[in-house]
Amino acid sequence: MAELEDFRRETRAWLEANAPESLVGMPFSELDGTWGGRRAQFASADMKLWLDVMGGRGWTAASWPAEYGGGGLSKAEAKVLAQEMAALRLPPPLIGFGLTMIGPTLLRFGTEEQKNEHLPKICRGEIRWCQGYSEPGAGSDLASLQAKAVRDGDDFIITGTKVWTSYADQSDWIFCLVRTDPDVVKQAGITFILADMASPGVSVSPIPLISGKSPFCETHFEAVRVPVKNVISEINGGWTVAKALLGHERSMIADAFGVSPRGGTRGGRSRLVETAAQYLGEPGGVLGDAILRDEIVQNEMDTRAFSLTVQRGRDAAKAGQQPGPETSMLKIYGTEINMRRNELMVRAAGPQSLGWEGPGFDEAELVATRDWLRSRGNSIEGGTSEIQLNIIAKRVLGLPD
Ligand SMILES: Cc1cc2nc3c(=O)[nH]c(=O)nc-3n(C[C@H](O)[C@H](O)[C@H](O)COP(=O)(O)OP(=O)(O)OC[C@H]3O[C@@H](n4cnc5c(N)ncnc54)[C@H](O)[C@@H]3O)c2cc1C
């Protein structure tokens, strides 16, 4: 305990000395973090500095082994770091699918060569990743995917189309599922492979959305040559890797809705409570609207209970336990809380929650509007809520088909 307290003191002092002052308490949206990559964009010069200092220390991936560019912290130390960052209300230095999805998957399934090649670049934010799972005819029924990869010497030649590939237009590499054996039961003929988006034959078409800020793309592969050494685990054994990665994806989504600074509980008053107090607060700190007050309190309690449950899952993960079907419960519950929280923020802010750009709205209001719109996709991404319920019924509760 004494060692951990020393670590806490040192960490706090280091963060206070190294975190750019402009980032302390900054309003932060899920859409505006630093994703890194060859074409990285930074919200400010200080966000770049923040990535550089944290990446240099391995604290972008605090609990990954130091030999692969991580911080090498124990689970207790990584938790202390997260707590101290939350106390200062600092944004994460780096976000994205490298840290949350393909990185943990490589740590488990990657060869030494694959880990050495990709993990340090992920930690330093040098390469941005996207996810090529969904296809026009394969979303919930993912195993119906048709993008095919045909062996040609030391390469596979990939042909097909992926859809809803978030941020493909800004990504450097893609982890994707391809069909390598069309003659066997659906799941058995799938391979998990990594491809450089700069490979000849890869093209990306953005899909616009009504919100004006769409992450979605269609990603086309026209006879794209990808080395066989980019296969993760076995050829035709990709389904196991794919499911494991989905566990990380669902944990990531749940995590974002629970204890992360982006989710709402930032240490001290949450964004929801701050928003309600700002627009509807009365002298003495009471909210006049009793119905809204009750709903906010309920959401705060649910979020607190949920964040503790997520924390238990996170501790188990740091102790080496792989995420299982229980991540579907976290995903669906986190989705419900997050969507409700965003609705409540919009209700509390009233007309001020309708801003999109221009004068009349401050930065926090514009962030809240975008977060609310973004939250509508929560019940679809990472597998829809109906699919999560099916998984819980079959794999957690053991109910028959
Ligand atoms: C914000 C966002 C980001 C995304 N990012 C990515 C990405 O980066 N990469 C990627 O590969 N994909 C991505 N997706 C795609 C996502 O994984 C799919 O949209 C999702 O799996 C659902 O597939 P679908 O859209 O084809 O819907 P469908 O599978 O066609 O489902 C349509 C409806 O039918 C219901 N349904 C389908 N099957 C069943 C069933 N067996 N039982 C009960 N109900 C059922 C669904 O719940 C849904 O309501 C993203 C989606 C969103 C919203």
Image: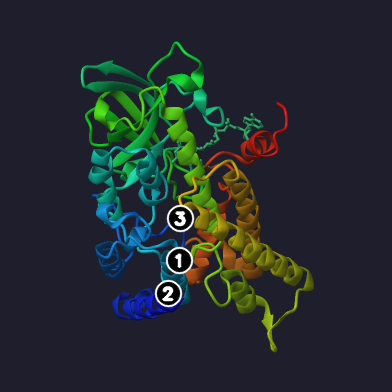
The C terminus sits in image quarter: top right
- Colouring chosen for the image of the structure: rainbow
Residue 31 position (above or below residue 111): below
Q: Where is residue 179 in the image (x, y as percent from the top left)?
A: 40, 21
Q: What element carries label 1?
A: helix
Q: Is residue 288 left or right of residue 242?
A: right
Pointer 3 residue? 318
Pointer 2 residue? 4
- How far apart marks 3 and 2 lie (CA) works out to 17 Å
Q: Say which quarter of the image contains residue 169.
A: top left
Amino acid type at image mark 1:
Ala
Q: What element carries label 3?
A: helix
Q: Does the residue labelled 3 lie within 8 Å of ligand 1?
A: no
Q: Earlier in the sequence, mark 3 or mark 2?
A: 2
Residue 60 position (above or below residue 143): below
Q: Position of residue 25 (x, y in %)?
A: 44, 75
- How far apart marks 3 and 1 lie (CA) works out to 9 Å
Residue 2 position (above or below residue 181): below
Would you say residue 137 is visible in this rendering? no
Would you say residue 328 is visible in this rendering? yes
Q: Which residue is situated farthest in the top direction here?
A: 183
Residue positioned 37% across, 38% down in the render: 109
Checking the image for residue 76, the label placed there is 1
Packing grade of label 3 (10 A; few <14, some 14-19, many >=20) is some
